[in-house]
Image (cartoon, grey):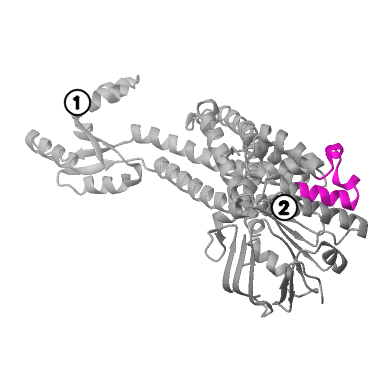
Amino acid sequence: MIRLVDVCKEYNNGTKAIKGLNLKIEDGEFAFLVGPSGSGKSTIIKLLTAEEFATQGRVMVNGYNLNTIKHWQIPKMRRTLGVIFQDFRLIDKKTVWGNLEFAMRIIGATNREMNKRIPYVLDLVGLSDKANVRPTEMSGGEQQRVAIARALVNNPQMIIADEPTGNLDPQRSLEIMTLLERINSMGTTMLVVTHERELVNRFSKRVVTIQNGELISDEQGGYYKL
Amino acid sequence: MKRRRLNLGYFISEGFHSIFSHGLMSFAAVCMIVACLIIMGSFALLAANADKMMSQLESENVFYAYIDESYTDEQIAALEKQVKSIDNVASVDFVSREEAKQEYLDGQTNELYVNMPDEVFRDRLVIHVYDLEKFAQTVDQVSALEGVADHRAEQDLTDAFITVRNVATAVAGILIAILAAISLFIIANTVRLAAFARREEIAIMKMCGASDGFIRWPFVIEGILLGLVGAVVAFFIQWGIYAGVYEAVMSSSASTIIIPVTFGSIWYWVLGIFALAGILIGMCGSGFAIRRFLRV
């Protein structure tokens, strides 16, 4: 669950990225966060992942109050999230299995747990036959599936996808979004940041629109109207 | 899900891997640690030898206080008490002029000395001291006592060893501080290079919920391994250098005055201190280097 209450974010150089934003996303929801470049989408993600902190207002993520969170609690909070990036951010020297094993090792999973969970997640994203392949030998769509698998492997409460289809062609983009919708239907909260109008309008989900750091609209089954 | 808290095998394997992924920088770091430890060790060994000489001198070191010839036995006993009460005096033995003569003649074969009259010798107090650094002060205190006609003290050798020990300790201290700082800097740079090469990986780890400790440990282990390798290499080089110097001293005329400590009797101290210093330098260097990369 995400709750932003009167959140403002001003960077040290004086840029006001977020201006009094209020937003609530319940557990199990699927929401698109849309807006043009520079509207504050990336800042919101940074606030949700505790890379940045609000200068005003309250930020709650999966039961953690990020205004008062202790430094040592941040890793625990992040373990409740799976983050997917536009540029995939996979470790090229590791295989697909290695990338997923790496994410599980971080949280202290045992070998038995890894051997059980990784095949399940690879099957879910349709990459069972690519476990021993390195990311550099895969297409963009496949690499994004690996990134989704990595985000999923620790069974997070919520996935935050930052422009997950930004580097993909329309067909692959549709496949990825369909996969995210499927994962959401299994109970994982999904927040997808994008500026791809066609994709957003096709899925008819909740659409939160921001511009210049302010909330413009928030509609269930809405459209990307900017 | 059941959680394990420690991934020691993973940390060690990552630490090893990191050393070889930037071999030249690791080599430079090891060389710097070796240089630092050898210089530190050489001065420490010099100080240890000077200390041993001092201990030997301290155990043998005496001076003589000659007693006024007009003093009676009671007065001599009172004077002996007074000398004993001085802080740095370990023991006082009274030697009569007859005993002194006998002792002297024991070492002589020439007939000229045999008929020497007793009056040539004086009653004396043989005084042992605790601390050689206060030797001169103690001699002055005893000489100032009423009833002490004269004294004999050979202080040149003592002063020389005190100077050697103090200079060696001071130089070792300064050099250790400077070289430790340089070693820390080089190790920190080596680890910083490794961390920079893996900055994307570190950012991914942070985003997946890795704790600072999980990210830091492989780098700390890399630093420890570099420090340990440097310590072992430095130990063997130090051994070689010391053995050479030992042989040179023992085969020269200096061996009549100086008997150096054998390396065999202190090798475990040298190895232990080198290992500890290497580990500390490695740990601190890598700890400093990685801090910046944890701020994600």
**Residue numbers of the magenta segment:** A125-149
Task: Give the label on residue B204, or none.
Answer: 2
Subunit of mark 1? B
Q: Amino acid at mark 1?
A: Glu
Q: Is residue B277 left or right of residue B105?
A: right
Please say if the residues under marks 1 and 2 sit with CB atoms less than 8 Å apart: no
Q: Quadrant of the C terminus of chain B?
A: bottom right
Quadrant housing residue B56? top left
Q: Residues within 10 Å of mark 1 (few under 14, many from 20)?
A: some
Q: Amino acid at mark 2?
A: Ile
Q: Given this view, does label 1 or label 2 mark the residue nearer the observer?
A: 2
Q: Position of residue B62 (x, y in %)?
A: 30, 35
Task: Give the label on residue B98, or none.
Answer: 1
Which SS class for mark 2? helix
Number of numbered labels in the structure image: 2
- Magenta segment: does it hold A132? yes
* Vertical comparison of B273 with A17: above or below: above
Task: Give the label on residue A152, or none.
Answer: none
* Vertical comparison of A170 with B286: above or below: below
- Disc nearer the start of the sequence (1/2): 1
Quadrant housing residue A133? top right
Quadrant housing residue B70? top left
Q: Residue at x 35, y 40 (%)?
A: B154
Q: Quadrant of the N terminus of chain B?
A: top right
